[in-house]
């Protein structure tokens, strides 16, 4: 059975320039915007376009990957009206975030997992407001403090007209800890979800991970997050069993990060901070990059950063040719 792979919203990591780079290499079926936080005011179109410039390109990234627009908040009226504005701007995939575990999100994101009735109300209002040709999906966790909460959570949002529910296989209490991950808890939720498709999320960073996750969750669709930095072609790896990028290819991708961010109005410091951020997440799974990362973090400008990357790429390509 063919697999589907999405790039996660990745708040604070995957803004538009980073999405452009990750999708160019990732071969994802869809990506998502960082969440648009809606308060008691309807979000202006100008703000949406600033946060999600893909509205100007048919709601697709430069390589053609469709983008879903994700919202976060607790006011069903303003969320629904904001989502309708996004639809009128071209969005055809709307996602509601009940999964963000940030302690800075006081009454939104995963905090609402404690209030299934409110989640149901928000999702129902969204579905009633959006036209039929706009897909609506929801992102949740297994629970707020315990995975025994999962059935009630799924039951509250698996309403007619919701196409997909992405389940991050940890509770809010579990944050992103490895020991809190439980793919197998998703298996018994399919019956509760009924016709709504479940998407597995959480530490799916390789082809082998996808096979094990599929076995334990019975899902054939996955959402990947931070693993996209250490394996920039992760979607192709999972779907087509492509060979994961080598160290030299990862470093070349970081050059693209610098080049892509340099085309925006970001300062030189911000450009280098994002290049360091990319490499920092890449070395989390490719520990061979750690010594170079420590050196790279000390560089102060784009010219120096590019020179360091190019020198390291030459060294790695030489090593790779010897090993092959």
Image (cartoon, rainbow, N blue to C red):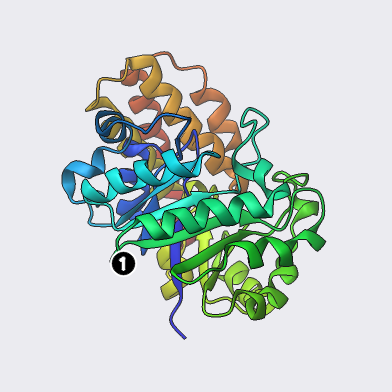
Query: Quick check: can you spot residue 30?
Result: yes
Q: Quadrant of residue 28?
A: bottom left
Number of labels in the image equals 1
Mark 1 = which residue? 132
Determine whether, in the image, residue 118 is placed left or right of residue 317: right
Query: Quick check: can you spot residue 26?
Result: no
Against 1, residue 54 (above or below) is: above
The structure residue drawn at horizontal position 75% and vertical position 46%, both measured from the top left corner, is: 177
Whole-percent x, y for residue 64 in the image: 23, 57
Label 1 packing within 10 angstroms: few (<14), some (14-19), many (20+)? few
The structure residue drawn at horizontal position 33% and vertical position 33%, both measured from the top left corner, is: 51
Nearest the camera: 281 or 183?
A: 183
Whole-percent x, y for residue 182 in the image: 75, 63
Determine whether, in the image, residue 288 is placed left or right of residue 147: left
Whole-percent x, y for residue 205 in the image: 57, 59
The structure residue drawn at horizontal position 44% and vertical position 71%, both measured from the top left corner, is: 4
Whole-percent x, y for residue 202 in the image: 63, 57
Q: Quadrant of residue 280?
A: top right
Nearest the camera: 154 or 313?
A: 154
């Amino acid at each position: 059975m063919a697999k589907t792979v999405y790039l996660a919203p990745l708040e604070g990591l995957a803004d538009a320039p980073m999405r452009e780079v990750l999708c160019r290499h990732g071969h994802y079926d869809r990506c998502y915007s960082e969440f648009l936080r809606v308060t008691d005011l309807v979000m202006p179109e100008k703000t949406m376009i600033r946060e999600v410039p893909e509205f100007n390109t048919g709601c697709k990234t430069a390589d053609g990957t469709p983008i879903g627009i994700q919202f976060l908040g607790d006011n069903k009226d303003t969320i629904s009206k904001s989502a309708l504005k996004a639809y009128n701007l071209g969005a055809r995939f709307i996602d509601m975030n009940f999964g963000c575990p940030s302690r800075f999100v006081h009454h939104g994101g995963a905090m609402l997992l404690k209030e299934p009735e409110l989640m149901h109300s928000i999702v129902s209002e969204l579905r009633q407001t959006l036209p039929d040709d706009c897909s609506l999906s929801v992102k949740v966790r297994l629970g707020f403090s315990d995975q025994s909460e999962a059935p009630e959570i799924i039951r509250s949002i698996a309403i007619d007209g919701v196409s997909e529910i992405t389940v991050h296989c940890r509770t809010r209490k579990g944050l992103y800890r490895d020991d809190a991950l439980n793919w197998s808890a998703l298996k018994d939720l399919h019956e509760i979800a009924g016709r709504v498709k479940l998407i597995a999320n959480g530490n799916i960073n390789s082809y082998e991970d996808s096979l094990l996750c599929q076995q334990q969750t019975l899902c054939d669709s996955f959402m990947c997050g931070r693993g996209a930095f250490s394996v920039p072609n992760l979607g192709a790896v999972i779907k087509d069993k492509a060979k994961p990028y080598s160290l030299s290819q990862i470093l070349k991708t970081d050059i693209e990060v610098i080049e892509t961010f340099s085309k925006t109005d970001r300062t030189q410091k911000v450009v280098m901070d994002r290049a360091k951020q990319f490499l920092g997440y890449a070395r989390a799974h490719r520990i061979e990059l750690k010594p170079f990362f420590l050196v790279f973090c000390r560089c102060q400008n784009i010219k120096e950063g590019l020179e360091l990357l190019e020198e390291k790429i030459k060294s790695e390509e030489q090593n790779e040719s010897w090993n092959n």
